[in-house]
Each structure stands twice: as structure tokens, then as C-alpha cells.
Amino acid sequence: GAVVSQHPSWVICKSGTSVKIECRSLDFQATTMFWYRQFPKQSLMLMATSNEGSKATYEQGVEKDKFLINHASLTLSTLTVTSAHPEDSSFYICSARVPGAYSNQPQHFGDGTRLSIL
Amino acid sequence: GQSLEQPSEVTAVEGAIVQINCTYQTSGFYGLSWYQQHDGGAPTFLSYNALDGLEETGRFSSFLSRSDSYGYLLLQELQMKDSASYFCAVSPAPDYKLSFGAGTTVTVRA
């Protein structure tokens, strides 16, 4: 079945560091991917929609200069958290859907990246 | 905007049946999905309803009433491995974005 791979699974770094997270669709092409953030014991909050070959669409309140998204190919989207600070520590999850599928095609989620900023 | 309400916690014993309700208010509606997430893991798709009625997938079933802006997930023959968080999510537009509820933590006891 369709699989979404996310890397790295865990990052611990110092404040001020920029961190890149990769999201790959392994056996299908994804023109659209989604990036979510999840704080402990809370729901998934959509941050942005990553569109292959065009600019990402950010949700209200999400700083696009802080969270840089690049979707350079049909199988790879990257999220870069720039100049990360402790308040950016969270669980970041990507998802993708198979293009052209019916509306009940589920989104496939990556395993998530746990980001801890010291 | 969108708002979804679901219970925060449910506890049940092995073999029991659990129903998780979800009521929603959205600007538009293109379907209600259910996802399971084990602690520290990724959400996995369980079920989807675009039309009124019941969808059955093994031990899990999902129901939707669009007129009542209401749906539920039914977990039957509960097993210990079903202990997880369950999220309902609506698709408010045909752009495949999902808006998630706060999640229901299901704890299955022996």
C-alpha cells in the first residue's frame, strides 16, 4: 500500500539552529502534501499545504518565513524550521494523498518528527 | 472556521463496544474521517463517510448524519491494542485539507 516516509524521526538541537524535515511518498506521486504540528495531548493542527512546483499555502497564524516549505518533486516535500526556539518544540507530521483518487481516499501520514529545541 | 467536538476520554473493558461521537460545525462539508493514533505514533486512517449512513470495516464502523452534523465511530470487540487516541476530521472544502477534532483517548482495560 501507499507509504509516506518522514525523516528524521527525532531531532534535538540548540536554539537558533535551522532544522530540515523531509517527507517522501514512497510508491506514489503526491502533488499535494500537508504539514501538521501536534503538541502533547493535543490535536493535529494543519500548518500548510505543500504544492508541487508552486508556493506552499500557509494556514492563518503560521509564519511562512519561519516554516519554509519546498515541494520540488512529486515525491518529496521538505519543511525547514528556521532559527528554531524552544517554543517550536513539537511533533511535526506530514501527510499526502494520491492524486486523482476519489475523495474518500485517505491521507497517508508519515511517522512524524519529534523536534526538541534546547 | 471549523469546530469539532468529541469526548476527551473513554474507558472500557476488553470485548466491550465503544461509541465515540463527533459533532461538527463547518463552513462547508465534504466528508468526515476517523483516524487512530497510538502514543508517539502517526495517525492511521480508519474510516470515511461522505454520505449519510453506516460504513463498516471489520470491528470498526462509522456513521454520519449530515442533517445533524453528527457522526460516530463504533469500536466493537475491544482489544488492548485499541487503546489509542481517535480523531474525527472534517473536509470543509474539496481541497483535501482536514480539520481535526481534539481527539478521544480510549483506554481498554483487561
Image (tube, helix red, strand yellow):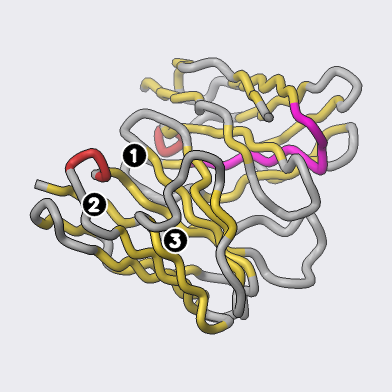
Q: Amino acid at mark 1?
A: Asp
Q: Position of residue B34 (x, y in %)?
A: 63, 39
* Label 1 close to label 2 by CB (< 8 Å): no
Disc number placed over residue A110 in the picture, else none: 3
Packing grade of label 1 (10 A; few <14, some 14-19, many >=20) is: few
Q: Chain of mark 2?
A: A
* B73 to the left or right of B54: left
Question: Which image quarter: residue A27?
Answer: bottom right
Real-space CA distance between mark 1 and mark 3, rounded to the nearest whole angstrom: 14 Å
Say above or below: B34 vs A80. Answer: above
* Label 1 close to label 3 by CB (< 8 Å): no
Q: Residue furthest bottom?
A: A73
Say above or below: A99 vs B90. Answer: below
* B88 to the left or right of A44: right
Disc number placed over residue B39 in the picture, else none: 1
Under circle 2, the secondary element is strand
Residue B32 in the magenta stretch? The answer is: yes
Image quadrant where one finds the N terminus of chain A: bottom right
Q: Which residue is mark 2?
A: A115
Under circle 1, the secondary element is loop
Q: Chain of mark 1?
A: B
**Residue at the location (45% across, 41% down)?**
B37
Real-space CA distance between mark 1 and mark 2, rounded to the nearest whole angstrom: 16 Å
Q: Amino acid at mark 2?
A: Leu
**Residue at the location (40% across, 30% down)?**
A42
Under circle 3, the secondary element is loop
Res A108 visible = no
**Residue at the location (44% across, 25% down)?**
B105
Real-space CA distance between mark 3 and mark 2, rounded to the nearest whole angstrom: 15 Å
